[in-house]
Image (cartoon, helix red, strand yellow):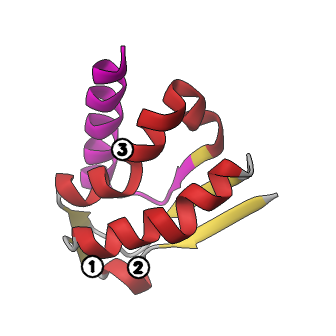
């Protein structure tokens, strides 16, 4: 099963509220990953954001499941800025895990 989380309604054009991101991680992302369901984070409309927001969304799943997280966690319609932030968080989280 695939679950798509559309982020724009929660984050707006500039994602900076890490409390909202934490809530999404705890209530939406982690429960689906725990059931081995694919989770698509749809960034359409979110033009930019903060590294702390991306960290709040995806660092814990990466810490829990390591590289295997990336088999189930997908990123859709991310702007170049958001792609850079996503890559940065993935890289340093996985590096810290080793």
Q: Where does residue 42 sit, x and y in percent of width and height?
A: 51, 65
How far separated are the C-alphas under marks 3 and 2?
20 Å
Quick one: SS at disc 2?
helix
Q: Which residue is the site of mark 3?
A: 59
Local packing at callout 2 (Cα closer than 10 Å; few below 14, some 14-19, many 20+) is: some
Mark closest to the chain's N terminus, 3 or 2: 2
Q: Where does residue 97 sit, x and y in percent of width and height?
A: 36, 21
Local packing at callout 1 (Cα closer than 10 Å; few below 14, some 14-19, many 20+) is: some
Which quarter of the rendering shows the N terminus? bottom right
* In the image: residue 62, left or right of residue 54: right
* In the image: residue 16, left or right of residue 67: left
Local packing at callout 3 (Cα closer than 10 Å; few below 14, some 14-19, many 20+) is: many
Question: In the rendered image, which quarter is residue 91 located in?
Answer: top left
Determine contact: label 3, label 1, CB under 8 Å: no
Mark closest to the chain's N terminus, 3 or 1: 1
The circle drawn on residue 13 is 1
Does residue 43 appear in the picture of this structure? no
Question: In the rendered image, which quarter is residue 11 located in?
Answer: bottom left
Q: Residue shown at 26%/28% (left/top)? A: 92
Determine contact: label 1, label 2, CB under 8 Å: yes
Q: Which residue is the site of mark 2?
A: 8
């Amino acid at each position: 099963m695939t679950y798509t989380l559309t982020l724009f309604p929660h984050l707006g054009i500039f994602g900076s509220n890490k409390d909202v991101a934490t809530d999404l991680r705890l209530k939406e992302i982690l429960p689906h990953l725990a059931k081995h369901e694919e989770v698509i984070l749809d960034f359409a409309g979110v033009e930019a954001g903060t590294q702390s927001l991306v960290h709040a969304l995806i660092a814990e799943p990466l810490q829990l499941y390591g590289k295997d997280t990336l088999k189930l966690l997908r990123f859709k319609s991310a702007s170049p800025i958001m792609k850079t932030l996503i890559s940065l968080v993935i890289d340093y989280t996985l590096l810290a895990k080793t």
